[in-house]
Amino acid sequence: MNWKRAFIASLFAVPVILLFAWGMTQDPKDIPSPLPGREAPTFALDVFAPGQPPLQKPLGDTIRLADMKGDVVVLNFWASWCLACRDEHSTLSEVARSYVGKPVHFYGVLYNDQPQNGRDWIAEMGGQSYPSLNDPKARTAIDYGLYGVPETFFLDRNGRVAFKNTGPVSAATLARVIDSLMASPVAAPAASTPAAAAQPKTGGCPCADSSSRSRSPSRRWPRRRRARRTRARPRFPIPARPA
């Protein structure tokens, strides 16, 4: 009986061991995102850290994604309490300066933090070349499906999420992704066809003759009224009263 118990126990133990071994080979930070290839969630966020010239933006200015259509956008989500954000800070600032004058926009987005804490952290790190935006209640982070910080999203020139980097981003990754997105063409807006423009507003709807049908009940109405009056008449004549 002991060998049967050992055999049954092995049936349960082997799958667990294999699953554990497979999990050890995976990177826990590599979390796939459903956004790449889809339209980037729009946003309108205020600048709380202006950055440095020539990438500087006025403090309190509202940055809208819709205004950057046709350019590459790099969104870096960070926080002052994030230790890994320190590893990429200088890299992001240096790479952002190297793309000055090109159709590329760098923006930091503060995640679950206070703007004053973010400004103090930037000063402690020696400044930041590009602006940072405040994200109240992390609404934009939720729209982008943020799992943690740092995370960097690359938006192509057509307003779609092209790539997501989890963890500190390297200069090689920034240059590789940005250069490939700059080389991609901008999709032309879809033009309306002449046939669609010439199509009547009714669209061939069968309700175009509704006016004729709306008059049909009025023609049947007198007949229904006459039918009710006919049914109201007695079937047999009433006998006359004796004199």
Image: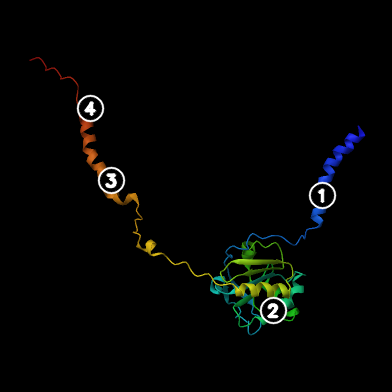
What residue did someone put label 3 on? Answer: 213
Q: Amino acid at mark 2?
A: Val
Label 2 – label 1 distance at C-alpha: 43 Å
Front of the two marks 1 and 3: 1
In the displayed structure image, the side of residue 209 where residue 9 appears, left or right: right
- Of the residues shown, which amino acid type is indicated by label 3? Arg
**Which quarter of the figure has residue 120?**
bottom right
Q: Are marks 4 and 2 in contact (CB under 8 Å)?
A: no
Name of the residue lying farthest toward the top:
242
Contact between marks 2 and 1 (CB within 8 A): the answer is: no
Q: Earlier in the sequence, mark 3 or mark 4?
A: 3
Q: Position of residue 60 (x, y in %)?
A: 59, 77
Residue type for callout 4? Arg
Q: Nearer the viewer, mark 1 or mark 4?
A: 1
Q: Spatial distance from mark 1 to mark 3, Cα to Cα?
A: 72 Å
The residue pinned by badge 4 equals: 231
Indicate which disc, 1 or 4, sits on the residue closer to the N terminus.
1
User: Is 157 positioned to the left or the right of 92 in the image?
Assistant: left
Disc with the residue nearer the chain's start (3 vs 2) = 2
Q: Is residue 110 toward the left or the right of residue 14 in the image?
A: left
**Residue 202 location, quadrant:** bottom left
Q: Which one is nearer the viewer's eye here, 36 or 106?
A: 36
Asked if residue 196 can be seen in this view, the reply is yes
Choose mark 2 or mark 1, whichever is in front: 1
Q: Is residue 240 above or below residue 195?
A: above
* 10 Å crowding of disc 4: few (<14), some (14-19), many (20+): few
Residue appearing at x 84%, y 45% in the figure: 14
Position of the C terminus, as image quadrant, is: top left
